[in-house]
Image: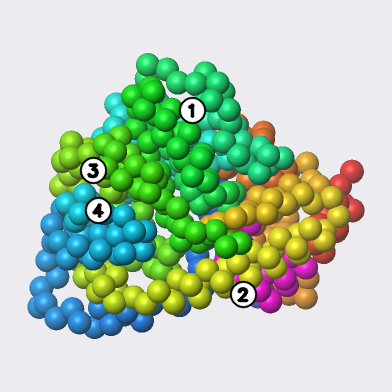
Amino acid sequence: MVNIKLSNRARNTPPSPIRKLAHLANNARRSGTHVYALNIGQPDIESPQEFFDGLNLFKQKIVAYDQSQGNENLCKAWSRYVNRTLQVQTSPEQFLITMGASEALVFLFMTCCDPGDEVIIFDPTYANYLGFAAVAGVTLVPILSNMEDNFALPAKNVIEQKITNRTRAILLCSPNNPTGTVYGRGELQFVLDLCEEHNIFLIVDETYREFVYDELEPLSILHLAPNNRRVIVVDSLSKRFSLCGARIGCLLTSNEEVLSTALHIAQARLAAPTIDQFASAHMLYNIKDDYLENARNEFQARRDALYYALREIPNVTVHRPKGAFYTIAQLPVDNAEAFATYLLSQFSCGGKTTFIAPAAGFYMQNSQGTKKARFAFVLKKSEIEAAIEVLAAGLLQYLRQQP
């Protein structure tokens, strides 16, 4: 038997709460149970035809490495897309193409921080930020936001108490994963001013930017600070265009030093996928506005279906999201992970069950999420309604079995 100690870095990287119970879901499927997957933000809306047209147009005889900064044509296409849809001015040179927003965040943690440096986040947060930080040796400093306040940002004095001489950045996600909260112009300006005052970076994850509801308009930090060198935008095509498997993201900033330094790391991994970049550029040049408009309307209808279905369950408290395609709900259980495990391993209703993501993994202060779960409204309305009907039946049976 080989007995070689593995790294603390890997051991301390938390498992994803989104996929933690996936083996149980797979077991349920193998046994013939239909699993409604509300645990993961994998949209079921078809990817744009323009992306597949781009794939068909790729005629090179060798699939070679692309440039480490990203395909020039994709940088141009993405810049033009951002300028057109947001009415701002960016240039292709301000983009660094990454393998999804995930890689962009790892690059930024490693570019802006030394091991032991700190980045402020707001709890609950996107669970994989914790993994990215662990890999980069960065300390995430959580500040709690509360469901009772619609997950609004905490007061200035609360945030400033957490800023130290090791703080390098504040990381925002808007529209937010996992809460669906959308920060308004005033809130973005508030955090920007705070970063200016304390001379730290503001990193804004805008992966879900276009998915805002109730007649809200997409808002970017670029509207407030188009050429601010302390502002870095993280973006992705994954959710916006149902291209999660293409793994195309970017970081966008007017800070040349950040870009040139991050490029050192990008060069070490060589390049993002050549064919996916080629197809993405073709798509961004040719995509019609009605694709996202239709997707936004569909997700709003799904949001409403999920929200109202959860509200009908006794003693469930649910947040009404304004964006993205997630919400947090508090369940009348002592431990949401135990309940989620029960649904997948011990319960079915008419041969069906529901997969939810326990929210403790989205909180660095885990106890805050013990009774909560994240729900993704990425299935069709009828499936969402059926999934919550199954969940309600499972909850009733689960509670009857509790001592």
Pointer 1 residue: 141
CB under 8 Å between discs 1 and 4: no
Amino acid on which disc 1 is placed: Val
- The residues tagged by marks 4 and 3 sit, at their Cα atoms, a distance apart of 8 Å
Residue lying at 57% horizontally and 23% vertically, measured from the top left: 158
Which residue carries the number 3 mark? 254
Count of numbered circles on the image: 4
- Residue 290: x and y in percent read 44, 77
Indicate which disc, 2 or 3, sits on the residue closer to the N terminus.
Answer: 3
Q: Say which element carries label 2.
A: loop
Q: Residue at x 36, y 81 (%)?
A: 49
Residue type, label 4: Thr
Between 264 and 199, the one nearer to me in the picture: 199
Q: Which residues are magenta?
A: 373-391
For this orientation, the residue located farthest to the left is: 61
1 or 4: mark nearer the eye:
4
The answer to whether 157 is drawn above or below residue 16 in the figure is above
Residue occupied by mark 4 = 90
Q: Residues within 10 Å of mark 3 (few under 14, many from 20)?
A: many
Q: Which image quarter: residue 152?
A: top right
- The answer to which of 4 and 298 lies nearer the viewer is 298
Mark number, residue 380: 2
Residue kind at label 3, given as amino acid type = Ser
Alpha-carbon distance for marks 3 and 1?
A: 26 Å
